[in-house]
Image (tube, rainbow, N blue to C red):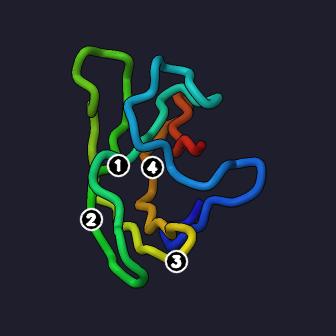
Amino acid sequence: MAVGWYRVVGLSGTQILNVQPPAMGYCGTTYPVYYSGTLPTYYGQIVSGTACFYDGSTYPCYFATTMSITNGGTYNVYYLPLAPGCNTYVIRYCTE
């Protein structure tokens, strides 16, 4: 995945998960990434929040980076930073 603006559609759902996942391995990835922050409320508004990388510990945001969301009217569009990864672990954004 390249850094850039993305809309969640189709079988992926309609948005990035915006609550802490229930466990590691959720949504088919070793370390699920979810959004922590407020959502934009009016068309064209852009807000920034936190992309949280969940590792299953009691600390819900093991690694964090900033991400942006814009309101597209009936949907949101997300500016996604690159999720870090290595050969051993799979780190992906979770959608719903």
Question: In front: mark 1 or mark 4?
Answer: 1
As helix, strand or loop, the secondary structure at mark 3 comes to: loop
Disc 2 residue type?
Answer: Ser
As helix, strand or loop, the secondary structure at mark 4 comes to: loop
Residue 21 image offset from top left, x and y in percent: 45, 27
Disc 3 residue type?
Answer: Gly
Quarter of the picture holding the N terminus: bottom right
Q: Of label 1 and label 3, which has the lower sequence position?
A: 1
Disc 1 residue type?
Answer: Ala
Residue 83: give its label: 4
Residue 51: give its label: 1
Which residue is at 42% across, 81% downward? 43
Question: In front: mark 1 or mark 2?
Answer: 2
Q: Could you tell whether 64 is left or right of 8 in the image?
A: left
Disc 4 residue type?
Answer: Ala
Q: Of label 2 and label 3, which has the lower sequence position?
A: 2
Q: Nearer the viewer, residue 44 or 35?
A: 44
| C-beta proximity under 8 Å, tags 2 and 4 | no
Q: Of label 1 and label 4, which has the lower sequence position?
A: 1
Which residue is at 35% across, 69% downward? 41
